[in-house]
């Protein structure tokens, strides 16, 4: 049995899929336990709209697979007391969130509660061998920290386009050497468990859906503003990837015909004007030209400026840094206004490292999006900042692979 269609899994990976749901009812049952906590057999029967006899049989089979168990008597609802069902305490997932300049790795339980998380600096341009070696080393460190000898599955997010079904990166603009690299299979062989790979913003959207401000949202956008810019799209509670997996790649929408050259090779892309690298570039130019004493002082302290330095200058009241942040927010807002008119989401969540530059960025994004969109589309549209931080990628990656392990449909991942 394959985890994902069209992939060539080796024998070890196929064997690792033995403990997974075998039927749609089992899959829905596991998802309910993951998302809503321990439930009685009566509650499961009501939620799944099946008989208690069916629930009992499916729970017994899931216990044999090591995925669920009976956890004692449930609270009485009148009449014969039902039995409480919970996920197996042995289920452990790893979430590996790789960014352009750092990575986060965590191990979760079956309900995706983070048991431990570690963050490491890295440079995605070093190539897949070095970056994945660091990611796997960190994963083993976290596993040792929480006393986990084996994983039920691992999810991986990377900052670039991904062929979801093949588990490989595809022509990622800021990831030289990663094109076509079999990330999923390499990680799966090393960890000895099923692995799912997706781009980082989709992973963050899933994390926000599971544990963040989007828990109650059925249709929302998650916009990541980091070194690059991307958008995760959730429609009716399901992540939308598009036909080839590149839906939401808003960083390469052209916003200025005569703008700077982007990492993708085109000119005037949103990412090239409003991403973290663009902020650092423009801040460096301002420092060297003498337009900003605060940025010049920060540049003198190190070899290069970063988006975080711009945020520090903003906190000092530097007008040039404030304007750079507002310009970035204005450009992002212009693109989001178009997306709002097209998609009509119920919520927009803004995340990523650049959000740390201060409130001015979010305020500008909100203002421009609201002004440029029709009142009907924005009258009940919150635009909020993610509160999960780096842990969102870990939780989202774990959520992604839990969807594959808990589902009888190999193509599912949420």
Image: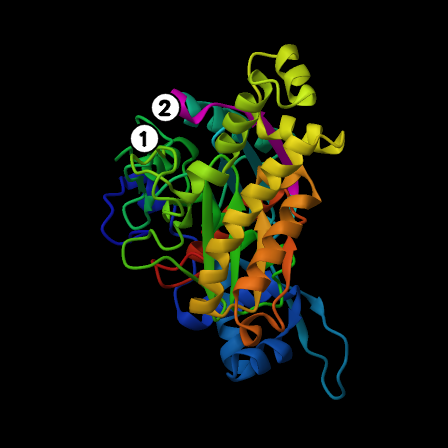
What sort of colour scheme is used for the picture? rainbow
The answer to whether any part of residue 376 appears in the image is yes
Label 2 element class: loop
Residue occupying the point 57% across, 79% down: 47
- Residue 111 shows in this picture: no
Q: Residue at the spot x=40%, y=54% of the render?
A: 248
Q: Residues within 10 Å of mark 2 (few under 14, many from 20)?
A: some
Residue placed under numbered mark 1 in the picture? 178
At which x and y percent is residue 148?
A: 58, 36
Residue 12 placed where, x, y %?
33, 39
Picture quarter containing residue 339? bottom left
3D distance between C-alphas at marks 1 and 2: 6 Å
Whether 164 is drawn above or below 390: the answer is below
Range drawn in magenta? 115-129
Residue 122 shown in magenta: yes
Q: Is 390 contained in the magenta span?
A: no
Residue behind mark 2: 127
Number of numbered discs on residues: 2
How many residues crowd mark 1 within 10 Å: few (<14), some (14–19), many (20+)? many
| Nearer to us in this view, 412 or 320 | 320
**Mark 1–mark 2 contact, CB under 8 Å?**
yes
């Amino acid at each position: 049995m394959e985890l994902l269609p069209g992939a060539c899994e080796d024998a070890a990976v196929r064997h690792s899929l033995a403990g997974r749901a075998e039927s749609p009812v089992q899959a829905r049952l596991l998802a309910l336990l993951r998302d809503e906590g321990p439930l009685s057999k009566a509650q499961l029967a009501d939620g799944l709209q099946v008989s208690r006899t069916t629930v009992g049989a499916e729970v017994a089979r899931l216990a044999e697979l090591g995925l669920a168990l009976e956890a004692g008597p449930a609270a009485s609802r009148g009449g014969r007391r039902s039995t409480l069902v919970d996920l197996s305490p042995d289920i452990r997932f790893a979430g590996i969130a790789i960014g352009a300049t750092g990575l986060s790795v965590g191990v979760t339980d079956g309900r995706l509660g983070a048991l431990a998380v570690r963050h490491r600096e890295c440079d995605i341009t070093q190539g897949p061998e070095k970056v994945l070696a660091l990611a796997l080393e960190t994963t083993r460190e976290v596993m040792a920290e929480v006393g986990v000898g084996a994983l039920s599955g691992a999810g991986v997010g990377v900052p670039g386009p991904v062929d979801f079904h093949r588990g490989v990166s595809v022509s990622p603009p800021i990831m030289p050497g990663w094109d076509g690299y079999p990330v999923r299979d390499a990680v799966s062989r090393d960890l000895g468990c099923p692995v799912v790979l997706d781009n980082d913003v989709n992973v963050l959207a899933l994390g926000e859906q599971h544990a963040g401000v989007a828990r109650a949202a059925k249709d929302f956008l998650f916009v990541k503003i980091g070194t690059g810019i991307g958008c995760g799209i959730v429609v009716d509670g399901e992540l939308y990837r598009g036909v080839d997996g590149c839906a939401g790649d808003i960083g390469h929408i052209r916003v200025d015909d005569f703008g700077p050259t982007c990492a993708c090779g085109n000119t005037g892309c949103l990412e090239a004007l409003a991403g973290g690298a663009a902020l650092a570039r423009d801040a460096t130019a301002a420092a060297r030209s003498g337009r900003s004493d605060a940025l010049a002082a920060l540049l003198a302290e190190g070899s290069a400026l970063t988006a975080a330095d711009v945020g520090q200058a903003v906190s000092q009241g530097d007008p040039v840094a404030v304007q750079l942040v507002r310009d970035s927010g204005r450009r992002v807002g212009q693109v989001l206004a178009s997306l709002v008119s097209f998609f009509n989401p119920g919520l927009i969540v803004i995340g990523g490292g650049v959000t740390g530059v201060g409130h001015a960025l979010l305020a500008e994004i909100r203002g421009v999006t609201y002004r440029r969109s029709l009142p009907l589309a924005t009258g009940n549209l919150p635009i909020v900042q993610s509160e999960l931080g780096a842990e969102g990628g870990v939780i989202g990656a774990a959520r992604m692979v839990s969807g594959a392990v808990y589902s009888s449909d190999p193509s599912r991942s949420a």
